[in-house]
Amino acid sequence: MSSSRIIPPGSTIGILGGGQLGRMTAQAAARLGYRSIVYAPDEPSIAAEVSAGFVRAGYDDEAALAAFARQVDVITYEFENVPEAAVLECQKLTPVRPGTLPIHLAQHRLREKDFLRQLGIGTADYLPIRSEADIAAAAAVPGALPGILKTCTEGYDGKGQARVADGAALAAAWADLGRRECVLEALVPFRCEVSAIVARGLDGETRCFPIGRNEHRDGILRTTVVPADLPPDVLATAERYGVLLAEGLDLVGLVALEMFVTADGRVLANEFAPRPHNSGHWSIDACATSQFEQLVRAVCGLPLGSVEALAPSRMENLIGDEALDWPRYLAEPAARLHLYGKGAPRPGRKMGHVTYVLRP
């Protein structure tokens, strides 16, 4: 199958991954007349609940991956930790957008930061930590400590990282993290956190959603506000970095770049995710085109939609038992409630979100 042809409505989209991002992608696809088939190793799958089909199999099952790829016209993924080998197996039969390079980089923090630097995107200072010798060398680098030690792989939502004050704390944290390959990031005295979500189509056109201003607690995104209420030059830099990244990846799909804004107005990239992002959920209710519809448009080769914000908005994640307060949200005229159907809430688990669409 040609990797450049347009996939028209009425076709079938394959989604690797069965979580809430896949669920909202399938819902957006259905609105445009597409069927979705979800591939995931776990059951139940909340994405499969709203899709036309579900393949339950491991990401190392080559026969199942091939059978899945033959059923669909294009494939995307809803999270960046799908094994690269699984994507390559699918690509033998069906286009996978955005492909392997974005996940190859996003799955490894050191590769990711090196790539951002190569593109001319600012980051905090960082050092690789692979051995006790690296720890000793880092302790001698001015400004390296205090810092944040992060595992290069498998960390998300604040997991796989520790704040370290000095060389002794760095050595202890490295041992606690399993003596794995890590990266030591310098602390950034930031004013706020922002994200740029950029779509790039088959023809190379890019569109950046309005920059969102984010608040995290305990490593988990809690709120996103749009507009971000920051100086125009800061917003322009954040958007430019997002577009640089999408173009540098030769992306067809969607990428979210999370950044810090310092007190003196610098913008420093933290990490990226080549998929829809939690900080873009506001777009479902307060933007001309949601990030999920934009992903469908991009991977199918359709024209990208408008990214005009229709109203100011504030998105709040519902974590754990917060989702049980759904009657209050339903009673608020400005609130738009989204529950993901995950069943029993657990501490730290994203159960849904609510977006307040505010008067301009």
Image: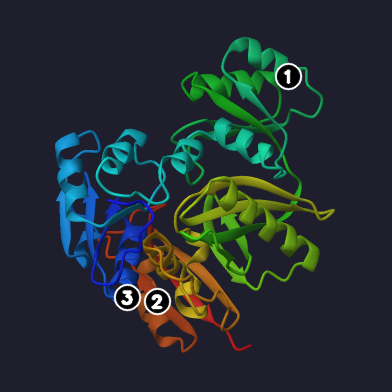
Q: Nearer the viewer, residue 306 or 82?
A: 306
Q: In this figure, which residue is indicated by the disc labeled 2?
A: 337
Q: What secondary structure is marked by label 2? A: strand
Residue drawn at (44%, 41%) of the image = 103
**Is 164 located above or below residue 236 in the figure?**
above
Figure quadrant of residue 194: bottom right
Q: CA distance from mark 1 to mark 2?
A: 48 Å
Residue drawn at (46%, 55%) of the image = 252
Q: Depth-wise, is mark 2 or mark 3 nearer the camera?
A: 3
- In percent of width and height, residue 227 lies at 65, 73
Q: CA distance from mark 1 to mark 3?
A: 55 Å
Q: Nearer the viewer, residue 101 or 201?
A: 201
Query: In this view, which residue lies farthest toward the right?
Result: 264
Q: Depth-wise, is mark 1 or mark 3 nearer the camera?
A: 3
Figure quadrant of residue 296: bottom left
Answer few, some or many: residues within 10 Å of disc 2's Cα (few below 14, many 20 plus, some between 14 and 19): many
Looking at the rendered structure, which numbered label has been put on residue 32?
3
Residue drawn at (74%, 28%) of the image = 145
What amino acid is found at the position of numbered circle 1 in the picture?
Ala
Q: In this figure, which residue is indicated by the disc labeled 1?
A: 139
What amino acid is found at the position of numbered circle 3 in the picture?
Leu
